[in-house]
């Protein structure tokens, strides 16, 4: 392996990238467009829940309970109705998520010290959102119930009783609880995996389609030098995409960056090299650009979105799927990005994730060179 031959391959491939200005512009613009689109559109926050209230009691106590819901930032009271039918129709139309019904004699039973209930009707079509909304509603009702209990005890004893347990909550790393701070770092990893793998998945297949691969093979270039030269050319584009993505996340989405730029840079370089080698491996394993494109999408988009922990928690997946997710490099890079951005942690904690990326890169590089050797032979 000689440096001059790698350099020649790099310059040849890089000139080809620069000549195709449309593809280069798309490659540099896609990270910004996808981050803006998904960053603003994809939100895991469950707030401003559309709610209807069916108050059959109309007492001061039922009014106080509805005020508790109105005062919470998690609920958006869309109005008051006079029947279950109205709630059912609104849920069926998707106009509301929750219907709160307060029974008749609610206030009288409450003042008499008798147990009373309220009914919360929830659209369970989206089970995750419904579970979160139900938790918020139960918290509001429990808070109101505790306040009523304290008021009754104060009325009986003449003094205000202290709370049995007073919780003091402190949220670390994402104190505002904005899902954007959690989503954007994951988006950067997924976008880079999809884009970079697609860029290189066509490079060798295109050479075969254009008939230039035979010319390359007639030169003294070795398979390892071809792989490294092509990877380095697209590595420059990948670094530019990474800088664009991180800058957009910090400046546009205001995601806090608490970690070390060095940790971020080293991890990004290792991740990019591994994914670039994977794209070249796909390209070397196929002879047509159509097949290379399809395999590139199948091996980058779906695993990156579904099996990396970006959208769905890996712990909730079946055991077999969890084991398979260990083979997805985006899983580890997402953990690194979130740790660097939000927690400010370094290699002493993220060492395992970085080690896996290094192993992944080495293995894929070896497989790519071997596949290229077979193609040359």
Image (cartoon, rainbow, N blue to C red):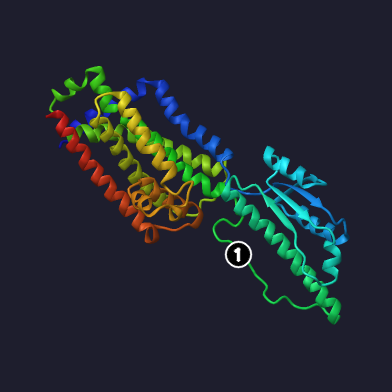
Q: Is residue 125 left or right of residue 283?
A: right
- The residue depicted at 70 percent of the width and 40 percent of the height is 95
x, y percentage for residue 310?
Answer: 47, 47
Q: Nearer the viewer, residue 217 or 360?
A: 360
What SS does tag 1 mark? loop
Q: Quadrant of residue 282?
A: top left
- Considering every residue shown, the one lying at the far bottom of the view is 157
Q: Residues within 10 Å of mark 1 (few under 14, many from 20)?
A: few
x, y percentage for residue 13?
Answer: 28, 26
Q: Quadrant of residue 154?
A: bottom right
In this rendering, the answer to whether 324 lies above or below 286 is below
- The residue depicted at 55 percent of the width and 40 percent of the height is 39
Q: Quadrant of residue 251?
A: top right
Q: Nearer the viewer, residue 160 or 251?
A: 160
Q: Quadrant of the C terminus?
A: top left
Badge 1 is on which residue? 170
- The residue depicted at 74 percent of the width and 69 percent of the height is 146
Q: Is residue 301 visible?
A: yes
Q: Is residue 145 left or right of residue 282?
A: right
Q: Is residue 47 left or right of residue 100?
A: left
Number of marks drawn: 1
In this rendering, the answer to whether 212 lies above or below 86 is above
In this rendering, the answer to whether 59 lies above or below 307 is below
- The residue depicted at 34 percent of the width and 28 percent of the height is 293
Q: Nearer the viewer, residue 11 or 86?
A: 86
Q: Is residue 3 visible?
A: no
């Amino acid at each position: 392996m000689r440096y001059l031959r790698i350099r020649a391959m790099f310059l040849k491939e890089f000139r080809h990238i620069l000549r195709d200005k449309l593809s280069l512009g798309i490659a540099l613009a896609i990270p910004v467009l996808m981050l803006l689109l998904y960053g603003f559109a994809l939100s895991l926050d469950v707030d401003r829940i559309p709610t209807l209230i069916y108050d059959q009691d109309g007492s001061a106590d039922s009014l106080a309970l509805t005020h508790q819901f109105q005062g919470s930032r998690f609920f958006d009271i869309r109005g008051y109705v006079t029947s279950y039918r109205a709630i059912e129709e609104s849920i069926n139309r998707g106009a509301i998520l929750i219907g709160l019904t307060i029974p008749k004699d609610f206030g009288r039973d409450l003042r008499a010290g008798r147990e009373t209930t309220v009914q919360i009707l929830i659209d369970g079509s989206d089970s995750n959102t419904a579970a979160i909304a139900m938790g918020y509603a139960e918290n509001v009702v429990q808070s109101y119930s505790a306040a009523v209990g304290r008021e009754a005890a104060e009325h009986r004893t003449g003094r205000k009783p202290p709370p049995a347990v007073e919780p003091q909550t402190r949220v670390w790393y994402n104190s505002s609880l904005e899902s954007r701070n959690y989503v954007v770092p994951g988006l950067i990893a997924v976008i880079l995996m999809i884009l970079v793998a697609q860029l290189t998945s066509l490079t060798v297949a295109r050479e075969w389609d254009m008939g230039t691969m035979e010319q390359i093979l007639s030169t003294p270039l070795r398979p390892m030098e071809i792989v490294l030269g092509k990877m380095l050319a697209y590595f420059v584009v990948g670094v530019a995409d990474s800088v664009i993505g991180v800058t957009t996340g910090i400046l546009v989405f205001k995601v806090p960056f608490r970690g070390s730029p060095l940790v971020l840079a080293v991890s990004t370089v290792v991740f990019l090299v591994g994914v670039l080698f994977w794209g070249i491996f796909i390209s070397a394993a196929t002879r047509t650009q159509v097949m290379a494109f399809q395999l590139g999408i199948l091996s980058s988009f779906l695993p990156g979105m579904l099996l990396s922990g970006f959208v769905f928690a890996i712990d909730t997946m079946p055991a077999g799927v969890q084991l398979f997710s260990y083979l997805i490099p985006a899983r580890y890079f997402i953990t690194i990005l979130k740790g660097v951005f939000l927690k400010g942690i370094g290699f002493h904690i993220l060492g395992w994730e970085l080690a896996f990326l290094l192993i992944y890169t080495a293995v894929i590089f070896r497989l790519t060179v071997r596949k290229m050797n077979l193609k040359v032979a």
